[in-house]
Amino acid sequence: MKEDDPQRENLNNVLAAAGRAADLTRSLLTFSRKQIIDPQPININQAVNTFGKILQRIIGEDIECKTSFNQEGMYVNADVGQIEQVLMNLAANARDAMPQGGILSIETEPVVMCKDFIKIHGYGKPGEYALISITDTGMGMDESTRAKIFDPFFTTKEVGKGTGLGLSIVYGIIKQHNGFINVYSEQDVGTTFTIYLPASGTLAWIGLMRRKRSWKGVRKPSSWSMTISH
């Protein structure tokens, strides 16, 4: 078709609509946990660090990105592309929560879910996990918003500004990896998403047995609220 063909614009609109429909279908499949994934043993620190190099393009110049890796050799069985999608969606969410700028922090550390943790939080499965924490210093969320953030099509944005699938996709991906995700938030203070991914094996955790973290003495800030996703 020639550049000056009067039907060219209509064709471009049709192709764009088809692309959006395809993206929406993939998003719905991810949320429903029917998207095909290709889990492989990956070093979660390396995956986060690699993605961090392109993160600035997503969050913009007014937001400072900080990363902290607690320990080397934290391996999980995961689809690296899907984990990058999780980080991208959470980074975009953090960017929108900090229109005047702020700090986005991504931290990793090895943790052990014990019976005490599961009893206190009401979810989980005993074992070793890689914990990824994504924290922003944005506007935070109220209780009613927190309760709905993983619901498909829920959004606080204006009509036409978002699909409302970003966080539901994150939820679906983590569940498909047999993990857990929580959110802590306080208005005018910020938000922290915590992701737990099962370790791929004890041998992959360098020095973990020497540094096991007991959850018995860990407490969340008393002023923060939490939404638990099963």
Image (cartoon, rainbow, N blue to C red):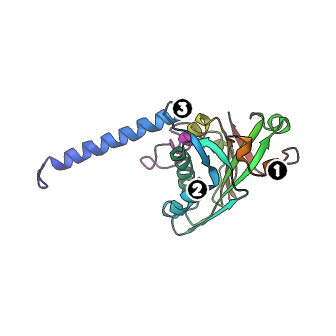
Q: Position of residue 99 (x, y in %)?
A: 55, 63
Residue drawn at 73 percent across, 52 percent down:
109
Residue under circle 2? 94
Q: Is residue 151 magenta?
A: yes
Left/right of residue 193 with respect to residue 52 in the rendered view:
right
Q: Which mark is residue 222?
A: 1
Give, as a three-letter code, the residue at label 1: Ser
Q: Nearer the viewer, mark 2 or mark 3?
A: 3
Q: Sequence-wise, which precedes: disc 2 or disc 3?
A: 3
- Of marks 2 and 1, which one's residue comes earlier in the chain? 2
Q: Magenta includes 87?
A: no
Q: Amino acid at mark 2?
A: Ala
Q: Residue at x 70, y 56 (%)?
A: 72
Report the amino acid beneath label 3.
Arg
Q: Residue 143 appears in which quarter of the rendering?
A: top right
Element at label 2 = helix
Q: Quick check: can you spot residue 59?
A: no
Q: Nearer the viewer, residue 167 or 159?
A: 167
In the rendered image, residue 170, in percent from the top left (x then y), is placed at 57, 42
Q: Is residue 228 above or below residue 3?
A: above
Q: CA distance from mark 2 to mark 3?
A: 24 Å
Which residues fall within the magenta stretch? 150-170
